[in-house]
Image (cartoon, rainbow, N blue to C red):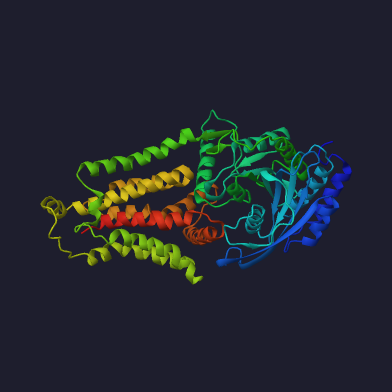
Amino acid sequence: MGLLSDPVRRRALARIVLRLNAPLWALPVAWLERTMQSVGLEVYTQSFSRKLPFPDETHERYMVLGTNVYGILRAPRAASTESLVLTVPCGPGSTNSQAVGLMLALAAHFRGQIYWAKDIIFLVTEHDLLGTEAWLEAYHDVNVTGIQSSPLQGRAGAIQAAVALELSSDVVTSLDVTVEGLNGQLPNLDLLNLFQTFCQKGGLLCTLQGKLQPQDWTSLDGPLQSLQTLLLMVLRQASGRPHGPHGLFLRYRVEALTLRGINSFRQYKYDLVAVGRALEGMFRKLNHLLERLHQSFFFYLLPALSRFVSIGLYMPAAGFLLLVLGLKISSLHEAGVNPEEAGGPSNPAPTLPAAQAMGLALYILPVLGQHAVVLTLLAIYVAGLALPHNTHRHSSGPELPLNLPPCRVMSSQAPDRGWMALKLVALIYLALQLGCISLTNFSLGFLLAATMVPAAALINPHGPRSLYAILLVLTSPAATLLGSLFLWRELQEMPLSLSEGWQLFLAALAQGVLEHHTYSALLFPLLTLGLYPCWLLFWNVLFWK
């Protein structure tokens, strides 16, 4: 008997959905405990608290207090050594109540089956990703983000896979799958293939990035739609933020997906029964795993659910961009420029530490005040543009050492030796950073390389300085973020005006800082402590005197 094929189960699901058909202004902890216990689960709660580094204006919160509720279905045919997780995030004003009802219906159905070889955890988290992170840290007995939480009273086995469910209504037109996790991590491709297989088997429409799958690959429309989907994935992965609760599971080597019910395609309609059957099929298949998912790819790009681009095909694109930096470094080195000359008399020694100090100030100072974080960020960012004038004025008149060799005196007095040495250091610095970023988050590394490499290769103080200055500003990390936001909304067919784009840019800056201090997202420190100081070195080269 399949899920909810019995009319009694159908009526039970209808009653649960009717009970949860209004937004959850507060998590009904007592009701969830009673309902989970009534279907035979071991029910536990976990309280947590988190004081954010500064007020989160997007969600209107600062001091967060919440409670997670989870029930464990023990496997009747095995010891509690492995487990699966079905999680539903909730929060104040959440519209995810239908997902809670479907999860409880699945728990009641799973409880009546005897074929389970793994424990199944049904988890309802409060305050969205904060509750998920608190539960994961307590489950794995670590504390990496500073969340204060009570210890878990009940545990299952090692988590093999997890599925997060978000439904805004009891009727959906498609299930949209999200794979981008924290810091660009991706789940094993086999988990995505499993989802697609059961959607096709049940006749359920599945989408990626909110886009339908291309039907005609022979005409131009199919490849163009795939390119649009691919660019959306690149932009979302480059952001480094977890685009769903599954993104936090990936940190703990747990393969996970987030499934969202959307209502964008009115010609298709599915009820919760169809969604439940697809989830049941996925969990039954994952129940038979003898080892963790590892046979397929962990690094890939998706132009469509049925097609993927492997790492061997897209990595050369970043390699060719880095090759430009390598050739430029080689040409400077063959010209007799030595990186050690960056500290010589004609190349001011304070430039390197001053650039790094500006990056350190950009990383630390905005959070210390807890108010006007974005304005402080922008002020420090713009103040860095004065770095060339300050450093040159500071080192305008150093005298040459008396014991300097004659050849070194001649080389140090050459008019171009100073900026060439500084550019050599900046190129090496940029190449090392982009190479490391591309290995861990290709999308971020490629976007930064595509914007920064051409400007870095062209910049010199003897060309059209105004044109080069505009080029440097347009390829700076902040301008790249602003342009990516406009491109992202354009690909989503929701174009922005200039004022809307600026407001979204300010919100993205605040969220980036907050997600670094809340979930340890690495984009903010990479930009402030690495790429921004490197960009300042090229700015210093351009205005060399």
Q: Residue at x 72, y 33 (%)?
A: 201
Residue, far right:
8
Q: Residue at x 51, y 34 (%)?
A: 310
In front here: 428 or 268? 428
Describe residue 483's horizontal placement relative to residue 421 as left or right: right
Point out residue 473 in the picture as x, y percentages from the top left corner: 35, 56
Look at the picture and state if 532 lies above or below 111: below
Point out residue 233 in the picture as x, y percentages from the top left corner: 53, 44
**Rendered-image quadrant of the C terminus:** bottom left
Q: Residue at x 53, y 30 (%)?
A: 219
Residue 13 visible in image: yes
Number of on-image labels: 0
Describe residue 72's horizontal placement relative to residue 399 as left or right: right
In front here: 422 or 232? 422
Look at the picture and state if 292 lies above or below 453: above
Describe residue 325's horizontal placement relative to residue 374 as left or right: left
In front here: 527 or 73? 73
Point out residue 481 in the picture as x, y percentages from the top left corner: 45, 54
Look at the picture and state if 214 lies above or below 41: above
Residue 478 visible in image: no
**Rendered-image quadrant of the N terminus:** top right
Describe residue 285's horizontal placement relative to residue 525 as left or right: right
In the rendered image, which quarter is residue 215 located in? top right
Residue, far top:
218
Point out residue 205 in the picture as x, y percentages from the top left corner: 68, 38
